Image (spheres, rainbow, N blue to C red):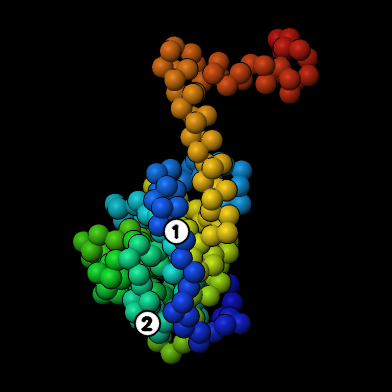
Amino acid sequence: MSRWHPDQWTVEHDAPRPPAELVDELARFPTTQIADCGGPVGVVGPGIRALTPATEVCGPALTLWTKPGDILFVLKSPDLVRPGDVVVIDGAGHTDAALIGDIIGGDIRRRGGAGLVVDGAVRDLDDLVDVGIPVFARGTHPATRSNEGPGALNVVVQCGGVTVSPGDIVRADGSGVVVIPLRHAADVLERTRAVAGKERSWRDGMAGGASIAEVLGIDARIAELRGDGGAAG
C-alpha cells in the first residue's frame, strides 16, 4: 500500500514462465476447489471482483506496481505482454483514479493477454466489455490522475492482500481470484485434483438419494463436537 517500491523504475523483460501444460491443467478447476486444496494458495480479498461478463482466466502473472493513480507504467505494460498473460496491477487499492481503460486493455488483449486483475479502479468499462478481456478490479472511476511514475514491471507486488511474483499462476472466475506461487504449482495441482475427486464422490452420493449431511457424516460430526455422544439437546 506504499507510494514507493524498492524496485521502482524497473522494467524486467525476462520474467519466469510456468509450463504451459501446468497452466492448462489448473484452468480445468474452479477457484473454489483451488482455494480449498490446503496448499500454499493466495486468495485475493473480496473487494476485487469481476466487472465484466467474461470471467474465466488462468495464466502467468505479468506484475505491475504503480504509484497510486499513476498510469506511466500501465502505458508501457503491453510491450511486455506474452500470449496468456494476466496483467496484475498493484494500485494500492485506491479507487479515486482509474489505472486502465479500453485502449490499453484492448492493446493487451490484441497481444494475447488473458485478463486484468487490478487492485484499484478501471474505466471505460462498457468498452472493456466489448474488448472481451476479463476484468477484475475494486471498481470504476472516469478519470486518471498522472503519468509521471514511478512504477515497475515484473516485480513482486501486492494484490488484494496477496503477494504476487512474476510468473505466478493467476486463476480467476465468477467466485474470485486465487494466486498459485510458481514454485508450488505442481503440488497445488495435485491437491486440487484430490478436492475435485472428493466433490465428485459427494455429488455421486447425492445423486443416489443421500442428503449432503448424510454424504458428509454431519450428524456424527455434530455429535462429536457437542461431546454428548449424539444425545438430543
* Picture residue at 54% right of the left edge, 65% below the top: 164
**Image location of residue 78, percent across then percent down:** 33, 76
Residue nearest the observer in this picture, 77 or 17: 17
Residue 61: quarter of image:
bottom left
Residue 47 visible: no
Image height of 148 relative to 156, above or below: below
- Pick the quarter of the image with the N terminus: bottom right
Name the residue beneath numbered marker 1. Answer: 19
Query: In the rendered view, does 95 fall on the left or right side of 216?
Result: left
Most extreme residue toward the bottom, as rendered?
A: 148
Is disc 1 placed on a helix, strand or loop? loop
- Pick the quarter of the image with the C terminus: top right
Is disc 2 placed on a helix, strand or loop? helix
**Image location of residue 83, percent across then percent down:** 32, 66
Residue nearest the observer in this picture, 61 or 174: 61
* Picture residue at 41% right of the left edge, 53% below the top: 21
Residue 70: quarter of image:
bottom left
Query: Local crowd at mark 2 within 10 Å, few (<14), some, or many (≥20)?
Result: some
Residue 90 visible: yes
Image height of 49 relative to 95, above or below: above
- Tell me the amino acid under the disc marked 2: Lys
**Image location of residue 148, percent across then percent down:** 43, 90
Name the residue beneath numbered marker 2. Answer: 76
